[in-house]
Structures are given as C-alpha cells and as structure tokens.
Amino acid sequence: HTAAAAAAMFWGMKLEPGRWTPFVPPPDVAMRLHVSQATARGDALKDGERVVIKMRCESDEAVLAGIDPETETMSDDEDGFEKEEYRVATLIGGRVETQGLDLVLDEYAEFTVEGSCGVDLTGYYMPEFGDEDVDDEDGMYGEEYDSEEEDEEFAADDMDALESE
C-alpha cells in the first residue's frame, strides 16, 4: 500500500428533508466510510424543533454495525432489495444542533431527514486493513523477546542498585 492509499480522506453529504440521498461506495477501492457527525444546516432549525436523521440499508449490515432498528417493517426500493429504516440521530434546535456519530459503511445505504431543515453529514474514508496489513505481536515491538526473562533481569538490576547504597 502507498501512503496516499492509507490516508483518511474527507467525506460530506448534504441531506434535504423528505428526500433519500444514496451513499454509493467507490468501486474497486479498499476503503470504508466512517460517518462521524451530523449538523443542522444554517439557522433554519428553530428553538426546540426536532430533526431526525434516518438511514436505510440492508438489515444484515446494520446488525453488524450495531444499529437498533426503528421498526420491524421492511420496504422494497426500486431495485427490489429489501432495506430497513433506522433512526441514527435527532437534532434539537437551540440544544443539540450537532451530533457525533460512529457509523462505518462499506455497502450501499441511503439517508434522509425528517423535519424542516437540511443536515450535513461529515466523516472520512478510512482504509480497510486485512490480515496481511496487521503486524504480528512480535513485530509490534520491533523484535521478539521473553517478557518474563526481561522482568527477572530488571528485578536483579534493581536489587544490585539497592544493595550498593
């Protein structure tokens, strides 16, 4: 992997009330999307008014991501794939106008807003790490060593220092 491929890249999406906006993963790129924040757009959110951000995706992926379903009902989209809707955040004017999120996506999903104002979703693409990219435990410290043996050597050195005082 090159350094450019391993770097995180900014991502943003503008959501409009009542309109489903798709997230389509980039083809042939080993990156996942981390959606990290939802923010009410502009000054359109009145004090105490609620705006709900919803996500629609295939249920298996949502379960893996740890999202609780809003309802048990499923809807069919134009392609015939069954998707479930989930509430991912609620913004409240004058109180909570920005909400941190921790959604990791690697498959198609759709987002919408229920309420009177638009919402900006932001986050970043992050590289997918496979088994070949993960260092083994020995490599993590630069070389293999026996921690018990080193602890005994350290204790012996400490005792020598105390006895010489």
Image (tube, grey):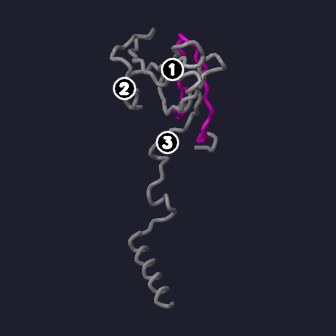
The N terminus lies in quadrant: top right
User: Which residue type does callout 1 highlight?
Assistant: Ile
Q: Which residue is mark 2?
A: 60
Q: Residues within 10 Å of mark 1 (few under 14, many from 20)?
A: many
Give yes or no for residue 68 being in the magenta stretch.
no
Callout 3 touching callout 1 (CB < 8 Å): no
Q: Position of residue 90 (x, y in %)?
A: 50, 23
User: Which residue type does callout 3 highlight?
Assistant: Phe
Q: Is residue 118 above or below residue 98?
A: above
Label 1 SS? strand
Q: Quadrant of residue 94?
A: top right
Q: Which residue is mark 3?
A: 129
Q: Is residue 128 above or below residue 146?
A: above
Q: Which residue is mark 1?
A: 53
- Residue shown at 48% from the left, 31% from the top: 103
| Side (left or right) of 41 relative to 160 | right
Q: Residues within 10 Å of mark 2 (few under 14, many from 20)?
A: few
Label 3 SS? loop
Q: Position of residue 114 (x, y in %)?
A: 51, 14
Label 2 SS? helix
Residue extent of the magenta highlight: 5-32
User: Which residue type does callout 2 highlight?
Assistant: Asp
